[in-house]
Image (cartoon, rainbow, N blue to C red):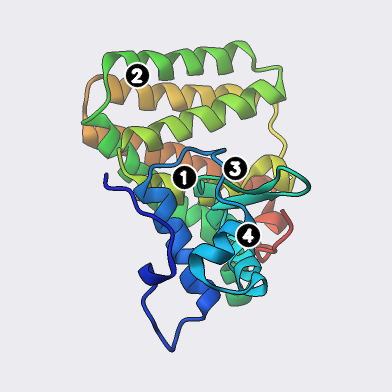
Amino acid sequence: MTGSTLSAGSMKSSRSIKTSERVARELVNHIVDNDLAEGAKLPNEKQLVEAFEVGRTTLREALRLLETRGVITVRPGPGGGPIVRRPRGDDLREGLTLILQFSGGSLKDVLEARTALEPTMARLAAGRITDEQVDELSASVERMRDGAGDHDIFLSENQFFHAKIADLTGSGVLRAFNDTLKSIADGAVVGVEYTARRRLAVAAAHEKVVDALRTRDPDAAAEAMRAHVGEAGEFWKRKYPELISRPVRWVH
């Protein structure tokens, strides 16, 4: 990748884009083009003001914009300043949550989206998974089953299982949407409680998905995941009817 340097000359003029936004975009280009790792320090405020030939107010507005987008964190005090933070899939959560809140969307809508998305991910994963990755998922099922009495183990393994399948698709887009939808409809956050019996049922559903992935059968993997996510939605509807129909709100 060819690196880029920071300079005012690299910013294209545009009447429709504020100077602070152009600075923010150039900083993003600089981070990506130079493959800066998370935690890398960017030039300090004085250096950035000089490089972009802008005022401190404009620069600070650009940094605030990048911070809200999850691109940087700004450490206060001597030796502080802008630090690279790679955006994550669940950074989309707040934006999508607000869209759903203003449009009257509910958790039912989110679960229906997951029911449509996750079988597709399982289908793609079936064609790309390795024997070692099958073993990883199988081990997760066993940990969930063995720790059925521990709610934290259940939540951890459930998160790992679905995130792993999203990773196996090889699609950054699908991973991002999966992380976002799961974070909005996070049962642990919205108040869903799972009994030991329910946790064992989830482990059994995961095992069916793993069995299909082991045979590299895309149709079987998609169907097993569709049954699993669909049944999970039915559980929420049956046990938490008021919760499932409640409008999504920006609360976490």
- Whole-percent x and y of residue 111? 52, 52
Earlier residue among tags 4 and 3: 4
Badge nearest the viewer, 1 or 2? 2
The amino acid on which the numbered mark 3 sits, given as a three-letter code, is: Phe
Tell which tag, 4 or 1, sits nearer the viewer.
Answer: 4
Determine the image quadrant of residue 197.
top right
Looking at the picture, how far across and down is residue 145, in whole percent?
57, 15
Which residue carries the number 2 mark? 133
> Which amino acid, mark 1?
Gly
The local crowd at label 4, few if under 14, some if 14 to 19, many if 20 or more residues have their Cα within 10 Å, is few
Circle 2 crowding by C-alpha within 10 Å: few under 14, some 14–19, many from 20: some
Q: CA distance from mark 2 to mark 3?
A: 29 Å
What residue did someone put label 1 on? Answer: 230
* SS for callout 1: helix
Observer-nearest residue: 173 or 80?
Answer: 80
Task: Look at discs 2 and 4 and give the one toward the viewer.
Answer: 4
